Image: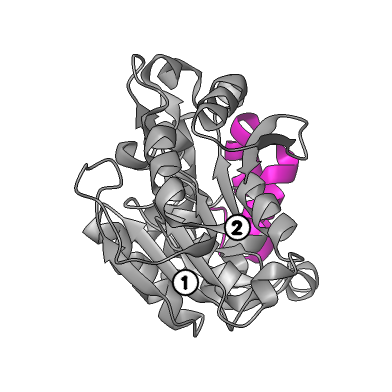
Amino acid sequence: MNTRNLRFRSNRVRDIMSLFHEELDGLYGSGEVGVYVDMLFEAFLGWDKVRLLTSKEQTIDQSDLLRFHWALEDLKHYRPIQHIIGHTDFCGCRIEVGPDVLIPRPETEELVNSLISSPSLHEEGSKILDLCTGSGCIDIALKKAFPQAEVIAVDISENALAIARRNAAINDTEITFLQADVLSETFHFPLSTFHLIISNPPYVRECERAQMQRNVLDFDPALALFVPDDDPLRFYHAIAAIAKKHLAKDGLMVTEINESLADEVCTLFREQGFSPTVHTDFRGKNRWVTAN
């Protein structure tokens, strides 16, 4: 593209910021657009918020201006900002993301932070199993919090595992990654017990697609999101079966849930001999279940 055809009034920072607000405030709101602008200047130019606030009259070169142009176009088509810059922050860890993995959500971060004070996981010889790991954000954050723990992470997608392995390397964490389908009847581990079995499995029912935002529906992998309407608890059946075999006597099972299915998940876990508790997130929604 000829950079002369870009809609920016100039390559001055103030004009770049103005165009983002003019074209995106109606889609995202002014506050959210301001956050996106901050993130883009940091990712593209290495500027922090102070540098950005004090450099509004500065100009940038045409190659950088082109990057802002394509970012603006992507945002107009609801591409997630995390995909544009290629990463996100999760519990203080830099996590690469892309179309093969879910973008970590604040609710998941809240769940992980709730576990970090757990005294049992600080003990030598503790073991953690992460099912449906995706980007690896959960197991990486837990390994950072419990460096003495052995962590095993499982996912069906080799593409997702490739990203998770890169994230583990970026964050200097030693994690064992396994490709496997947790729904398979042949899924098993060597004889081993875990002090924590954790999962953020697919739990969005197909009938709920229409309620989802485009930035999730169009860009997150369907494999990591959806379950059939007639079998929405399939992963919880599998997780409970794995926990019955591999959860330590004093261990904890933790799973994220569909807020509409909290009662059903708890009933399933009780039927499998566990004592479940529902936890609400910072929005007051049923978000995860712990069981032992």
Which residue is found at the position 66% from the left and 43% from the top?
21
In the image, is residue 26 part of the stretch drawn in magenta? yes
Identify which amino acid the numbered label 1 is placed on: Val
The foreground one among 7 and 141 is 141
Tag 1 and tag 2, C-beta contact below 8 Å: no
Q: Please determine whether, in this image, residue 159 is positioned above or below residue 238.
A: below
Q: Is mark 2 on a helix, strand or loop?
A: strand
Specify the segment rendered in magenta: 8-37
Q: Where is residue 80 in the image (x, y as percent from the top left)?
A: 48, 47
Colour setting:
one colour
- Quarter containing the N terminus: bottom left
Label 1: few (<14), some or many (≥20) within 10 Å? Answer: many
Q: Position of residue 69 (x, y in %)?
A: 45, 55
Residue 60 appearing in the image: no
Which residue is found at the position 46% from the left and 58% from the top?
130
Residue, disc 1: 151
The foreground one among 253 and 275 is 275
Residue, disc 2: 251
Q: Please determine whether, in this image, residue 191 is positioned above or below residue 277.
A: below
In the image, is residue 17 part of the stretch drawn in magenta? yes
